[in-house]
Amino acid sequence: MKQARLAFRLALPAAYRAGDFLAFHRRDAAALAERVDGNALLKGIVWAGRPACLGVRFGARQAAVALVVDGAGAVPDADAARRMARRMLGLQQAVEDFEARYRGHPSLGPLIAANPGLRVPLLATPFEAMVWAVIGQQISLAAATSVRRRLIEAAGIRHSDGLLCHPDPARLARTGEAQLRAAGLSQAKAAAVATLSRGAAEGTLPFDAWADAVPIAEIRARLAAIRGIGPWTIEYTLLRGFGHLDGSLHGDVAVRRKLQRLLGREDSISAAETGRWLGQFTPWRALVAAHLWAWHPPVPLQPL
């Protein structure tokens, strides 16, 4: 089979946490669409309508990136591929500025000390992040991972190296709500994914264009107008798809539980109170939420 290939290298900060990036893409143990081997990731994506394999291999202070697209044709757009890789790796996130500002904060400082250099790994495209966010609404990570796997299997886009590829908007727009339901999505989620896919395929929801110049207010307004898309889904998409670090994930159950432990509270903390607490860290609220996700509070000693 003829293939188009592109390879380049990206410089990494001295404290770059490659393990976080690899762990994020290793969440599905079945490894049908993402395969982590040692210090490298292989991920199936769709590039310009064709099955493709994105490879990221970490070395000393650099990441070697390769994109292999099935089928004859021109070499992939190097600038577009580089922008995608930089977003995925979180290299556009000014975490050094965040840490310098809040390292001495009485509550947040210990979280930064526990996970210095923490960045938010992104999915390959904002559309993939949007689909993942819809799937993950109000269900566990394990359940969401299973549904996502079945969705990718149903789409049936396979790269020549064997990896399945997360479907692009055009493929999902042709899939139909019945097949989405069969993959495990609820009726409301299937309808939302179908609407998002049609919008992205037709250009009324220009996820790729938004990725290069993120109009936060417009994205929020356009997505909020779609039935079944709520605040958590929008903010999670902005974080994992666009790298927007100031979304308020105050409705996230894990964020609220970790904040309760951090503040030493016996009573649960409401979403509204969590939102007020996160608000003091604008424009870094989503990054603070990521630190809460990553924080593993010490287990209290039990009396003998």
Image: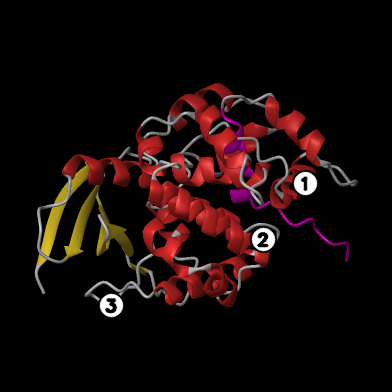
**Label 2 sits on what residue type?**
Ala
Q: Secondary structure at mark 3?
A: loop
Seen in the image, is 128 located left or right of residue 268? Answer: left
Q: Secondary structure at mark 1?
A: helix
Mark 2 and mark 1 lie on one chain; the one further toward the N terminus is 2
For label 2, the residue is 188
Q: Secondary structure at mark 2?
A: helix
| Res. 302 visible in picture | yes
Q: Quadrant of the C terminus?
A: bottom right
Q: Is residue 258 above or below residue 184?
A: above
Q: How far from the left and from the top, in percent, is residue 232?
A: 66, 45
Relative depth, front residue between 57 and 216: 216
Mark 1 and mark 3 lie on one chain; the one further toward the N terminus is 3
Q: Which mark is residue 261?
A: 1
User: In this rendering, which labeled residue sits more in front, label 1 or label 3?
Assistant: 3
Q: Which mark is residue 162?
A: 3
Q: Is residue 128 magenta?
A: no
Relative depth, front residue between 186 and 293: 186
Mark 1 near mark 3, Cβ–Cβ under 8 Å? no
- Distance, label 2 to label 3, CA atoms, is 32 Å
User: In this rendering, which labeled residue sits more in front, label 2 or label 1?
Assistant: 2
State the residue at coordinates (32%, 37%): 13
**Label 3 sits on what residue type?**
Gly
Mark 2 near mark 3, Cβ–Cβ under 8 Å? no
Quarter holding residue 269: top right
Q: Which stretch appears magenta?
A: 284-304
Q: Is residue 290 magenta?
A: yes
